Image: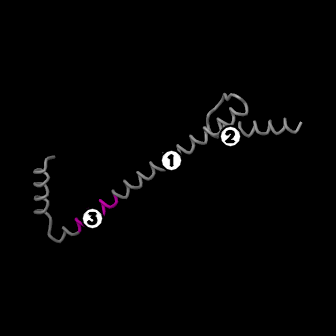
Amino acid sequence: MSLSEILVILIITLLILKPKDIPIIIKTTQQLIGYLRNLTAEFSSHLHNSQDNNCDTQDEIKFYLQKIIDINGTYEGDYSIKHLKSKYHELIQLKVQELQK
């Protein structure tokens, strides 16, 4: 839509509406704009937090992989954080048992 088309629509709308309805329409429009801005900010915040969580998880995966490789030399298996933690704790328990012998 061009600017002239929008202006024509606005002028026709103002002619059709009653003057007492204009403040209500303006207030409703402001509320809608505020809601959309709030929704946009919330969405952006959610994306930012999601990216931070992914970075934290990746750092944790790297940490456990490095520890497992330092202890065992290699790692083959699932790369989910749950499996990496359990494998790391399993290796630690084995090392502790070896040291106790």
Which one is nearer the viewer's eye here, 41 or 64? Answer: 64
**Image color mode:** one colour
Q: Which residue was labeled with disc 1? A: 52
Q: Which residues are magenta?
A: 24-35
Q: Examine the structure image and report whether residue 30 is included in the region drawn in magenta.
A: yes
Q: Examine the structure image and report whether residue 18 is included in the region drawn in magenta.
A: no
In the rendered structure, the answer to whether residue 85 lies left or right of residue 53 reads: right
The quadrant in which residue 63 appears is: top right
CA distance for labels 3 and 2: 53 Å
In the rendered structure, the answer to whether residue 82 lies left or right of residue 21 reads: right
The amino acid beneath tag 1 is Asp
CA distance for labels 3 and 1: 36 Å
Q: Residue furthest bottom?
A: 20
Kindly identify which numbered label has been placed on residue 28: 3
The amino acid beneath tag 2 is Lys
Q: Can you say which quadrant of the picture contains the C terminus? A: top right
CA distance for labels 1 and 2: 20 Å
Q: Up-down: is 58 above or below 12?
A: above
How far from the left and from the top, in percent, is residue 39? 38, 55
Q: Earlier in the sequence, mark 1 or mark 2?
A: 1
- Residue at disc 2, secondary structure: helix
CB contact under 8 Å: marks 3 and 1: no
Kindly identify which numbered label has been placed on residue 85: 2
Q: Up-down: is 83 above or below 18?
A: above
Kindly identify which numbered label has been placed on residue 79: none
Residue at image coords 61%, 37% = 80
